[in-house]
Image: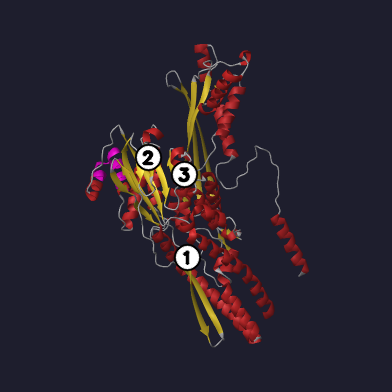
Amino acid sequence: MSIYRRVLLFILCSTPLLIQGCNSWQVNELSAALPAVGPQKTLLELEKITPSQRDRVQYLLNRGILNLYLAELESSRKDLEEAKAIILSLQAVSLSENMAAYTASELLRSYGGSPSDKVLVHVMLALSYLMSGDLIGARVEVLQADSTMQQLDDGETSSGQLASARFISGMIYELGGEFDDALISYRRAYKIMTGRNETIPLALQTSLLTLSQRQGQVIEYQQYSQQFSRVASVQNSDEGEWFVIYYDGLVSNKAEARISVYDPGANAVISVVMPQYYPSTYRPASLILNADSHNSRTQIIEHMEVRVREDLNRKKAGILAAATVRAIAKYQLSRGAGQQDPLIGALVNLAALASEQADVRSWNMLPASIQIARIPVKLNQQLELINKSRTLPAIAQLTPSKYAVLLVSSLTPQLHSYPVNEAISALQ
Amino acid sequence: MRNLVAVLMLVLVSACSTTVERVASDSTVDLSGAWNDTDSRLVAEEMVADVVSRPWISDYNADTGKRPVVIVGTIRNLSHEHINVNTFVADIERALINSGRVDFVASKHERDEIREERVEQDLNAREDTRNAAGQETGADFMLKGQINTILDVAGKEQVRYYQVDLTLISMSDNRKVWLGQKKIKKIVSNAKIRY
């Protein structure tokens, strides 16, 4: 193939990349504006974008979580289930995408989700099923999350190991009366958090103490009791408990770090771009709850700002290797063209610069942190959400069981509960 | 070169079009390795063959002189997949009713709608066509069960083991009169490479 044809082909191939790159930036802009404009408007804007098949997973994950925030639970599940199926199909290595990524752009790979995304899609689905009143559906998803975490466990890093997923699994087992499985999940959450030197939230401490005592694990109970300087509180027959899951803030977007080097020998600029996260500016805020004139706060079990950065750091070596190979290929093409015709060489160089875009795609409408609380209450006692200026009905009005679950996001006044209750889910 | 372009165009066009092929409803088509219609059918066939061949029906006939009345209780899905248990439960119901040896009454979820309709009839239907409340047939047995799975995954290989357990429990004394079990094991190999 003559150099002119190669150049033409290269410029033709670069054009769709520019369009795709625009879509990525558009989604990132929507995500950045989400805290200010809210999920409803963001969803409307997102739906104006037609994603390429390569970006479909990112699109579905974002639309799925926006619908979850907005209590459009069926739509949320439809999107997240589709995303889950595509993620599974993308686990096979693509020859054409790898070739394209090494020669043209990282954006030519399909977005298949980070390790955290792969687990969180099950977690969000589990909560969506639960908030629709389907405990069995939620249980299916936590089993799938468990299977995914086992597959992602490399035994060396904590890639794809989410304490929040383990805690929510434990909660779902506990709601179903499967206390042995619940204890196993809480233990795993504890192990993940201690492995990361993270503070164990009070809700997880309570779960470990209560369940280890209930299941007769005397030594284990004593160890937890000693470590947390607490004992398990005995629940009276007129008492129940709220599990509270709180999504706070919004996770950061990826940005592009461009390194351009001018090579005087070839009269060309070699450009290498890498995705990066800027240092997080997120300041965690808790949901404050009041029961019987006693204030409690939700506490962080998953710092998503940290998890997304860990996921990217683990991939960076591979991305850099591909970027370097790509830069050399483009440099050689540019140099070849420049030797034949300096104008064509300059054009190729420009096209190379323009086509070199970092893959800044991510599930960027996730919360910045996932927080939890377990609030013991009298069965006939209301629960007040101080930050949301809402008072919830007593557990006795919701369920004959002693447990209820509340899902709250800082991005919307919408509340979700299990068991489903119209008074709680109605916007006020 | 032109021939090559033509062939490529043909491949592209054929890849873009939707194709539909009708197959027999009892043919086995495994796409993802997940629970599918074939699994549901195998469970129903196994359970039906077993439940009608056991002595609980004849024992009940001998004791009471009437056909047993069965209600479907909760079939819990404790598996890794979102499985619609209604498909094989409906197959089992159909086979038992058609055998003429067992009667089924509406399940808890079904009967709520029927009771609502009866109340409506009480208000709106002509007196000679009304169905009175309090005339329902009580069930003698309840069908309960669960689906469990064990998943073993290594790399792209998976072993999926399903176990479906159904139990028929006497309403009068909680005796378990029939236990049905079907096990299904699948080895699923996911693609390592895609185009």
Residue at which label 2 appears: A174
- Residue A172 shown in magenta: no
Query: Which mark sits nearer the N-terminus, 1 or 3?
Result: 1
Q: Residues within 10 Å of mark 2 (few under 14, many from 20)?
A: some
Residue carrying label 3: A427
Q: Secondary structure at mark 3?
A: loop
Quarter-wise, where is residue B96 in the image?
A: top right
Q: For the residue marked with disc 1, what is the amino acid?
A: Lys
Distance, label 1 to label 3, CA atoms, is 33 Å
Is residue A1 something that shows in the picture? no
A158 or A391, which lies in front? A391
Callout 3: 10 Å neighbours few (<14), some, many (20+)? Answer: few
For marks 2 and 1, give the CA distance: 37 Å
- Foreground tag (2 vs 1): 1
Q: Three-letter amino acid code at disc 3?
A: Leu
The magenta segment is A204-221
Q: Residues within 10 Å of mark 1 (few under 14, many from 20)?
A: many
In screen coordinates, is B71 left or right of A183? Answer: right
Is A190 or B46 nearer to us in this picture? A190
Which residue is nearer to you in this view: A389 or A294? A389
